[in-house]
Amino acid sequence: MKALVWHGKHDVRTETVEDPQILNPRDAIVEVTTTAVCGSDLHIYNGLVPGLKPGDILGHEFVGRVVETGSGVDDLREADRVAVPFSIACGGCDLCERGQTSLCANANPNAEMLETMYGHGGGGLFGYSHLYGGYAGGQAQYVRVPFADFGPLKVPEEIADEQAVLLTDVFPTAYMAVENCDIRPGDVVAIWGCGPIGQIAVRCAFMLGAGRVVAIDRFSYRLDLAKEAGAETINHDDVPNILEALYEVTGGRGPDAVIDCVGLEAHGTSADAVLDYVKQAVKLEMDRPHVLREMIHACGPGGRVSVPGVYIGFIDKFPMGAFFGKGLQMRAGQTHVHRYMRPLLERVQLGQIDPSVIVTHRGTLDDAPRFYADMAEHKDGLLKAMMRAV
Amino acid sequence: MRVLYPYPGMLVILMNAATITVKAPRDDVAAVFSNGDIVREAFGDEGVQCRFSYIDAPGARGTEIHASCEMNQKAMKSALRKCRALLEAGEIPTGARRR
């Protein structure tokens, strides 16, 4: 089969590899019909995620049809059309039962690697390093789906592939990020980063009752799309001080909630941002947390800080004084996709939202290396690339 | 495992310890572990030397399994994770693509 294979920093190739096999009773093999490149895939592409091995297959956003099931999978049949959550979960552990499926206690066969870094093991992810289980990803023609009796969601035929793919990560991630803000009617929500997650977060914030949403980015094509959804926009490069700009927009109060849709590769020209670049380059700091600092500084007293953007390791100069002094609350983490897929599918069916408005580029698996490169360099207005795999 | 010789003629073996919580009632966990199959599958032959005790976890979270063994602690933890996966998920996860 064809698959997108990681060979090193800035080196991904579409290659022919061996097809996956059923290995456990609860496995299924899914023939991928459409897959997407996620912003978090770029952290791998840019060499910032540890635990990759040459030959690893990337990708965690995909939809397809079941072609084979293990003996323990009763509720899926051949040809069923399924959307597969990017996180892998067993459904039987305490965390899964509580709905925190991205933290599943049993899905990560390499849990000891994460335990060394984080103190505890964590869940499994498709195509996202051996830290998260070493599972082959879905930027491929076929993928082995573990715990297939718990994860995949059958998708009705009236839902387009592109909409279904966005139910596997982007839409649930944006929704959970906004839900983590505990929005009260009329709240002002500020969102850093208008990539795919930020765009959908703008729409979810309004859906969940925000009075005003402020979208912050440095690319006008992204800000324009956020504006179409009703957001007020701030171009980060056009204002000397984001705090002042947010004072202006919020009447001096600051946002009630802030969302970091950027993560560990924040750009910036301030002293702290430049220092982050240097520290990351010489491996004194794993992540570049400029946005996190800026959000905590800008968030209004008693506000909520939501972090769907990916962070991997250690950061410096975390403004704990401001965080404590303003009585902020923070929630973060990988999305518990299993919890959100069905209700969000219903929202799409009801026409409340069409997440596929963010799709700007379409191609095949052969185009994947180009999409990665263009996305990393923000070329050609690429916001979200979808690839046919069949 | 640590071996101490406090004074000539006396040997003290300190077992390693590891613990894990499994989402299952204590009696069920104890019954499965006493059977031995799951222990052999997860711990290998060294597992037969391990001692297990079981405590109800608070908040209806299942059962804490406390193991003491001569195996190194990392291997014990890994084996306990496999036991938990067998009990909760019915299989041991693998990131492999092919046999």
Image (spheres, coloured by chain):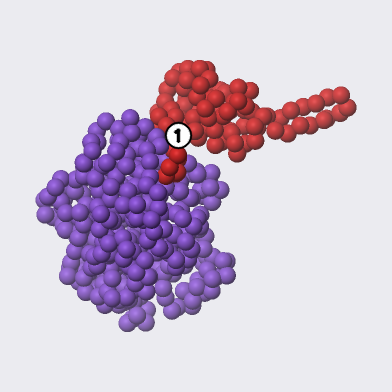
Chain colours: A purple, B red
Along the line of sight, which residue is nearer the eye, A235 or B85?
B85
Q: Left or right? Give the position of A160 relative to A239.
A: left
Label 1 sits on what residue type?
A: Ile
Question: Would residue A251 be seen by someone viewing this image from the given angle?
Answer: no
User: Crowding near pointer 1: few (<14 within 10 Å), some, many (20+)?
Assistant: many
Question: Would residue A39 be seen by someone viewing this image from the given angle?
Answer: yes
Residue located at (58% from left, 28% from top) = B44
Residue located at (36% from left, 44% from top) = A144
Residue located at (37% from left, 38% from top) = A22
Along the line of sight, which residue is nearer the eye, A215 or B96?
B96
Q: Position of residue A389 (x, y in %)?
A: 27, 56
Q: Quadrant of residue A108?
A: top left
Q: Position of residue A376 (x, y in %)?
A: 38, 70
Q: What chain letter is assigned to the residue under label 1?
A: B
Along the line of sight, which residue is nearer the eye, A70 or A283?
A70
Relative to A39, say whether A33 is above or below. Answer: above
Along the line of sight, which residue is nearer the eye, B9 or A154?
A154
Is label 1 in a helix, a strand or a loop?
A: loop
> What residue did someone put label 1 on?
B92
Q: Position of residue A325 (x, y in %)?
A: 44, 62
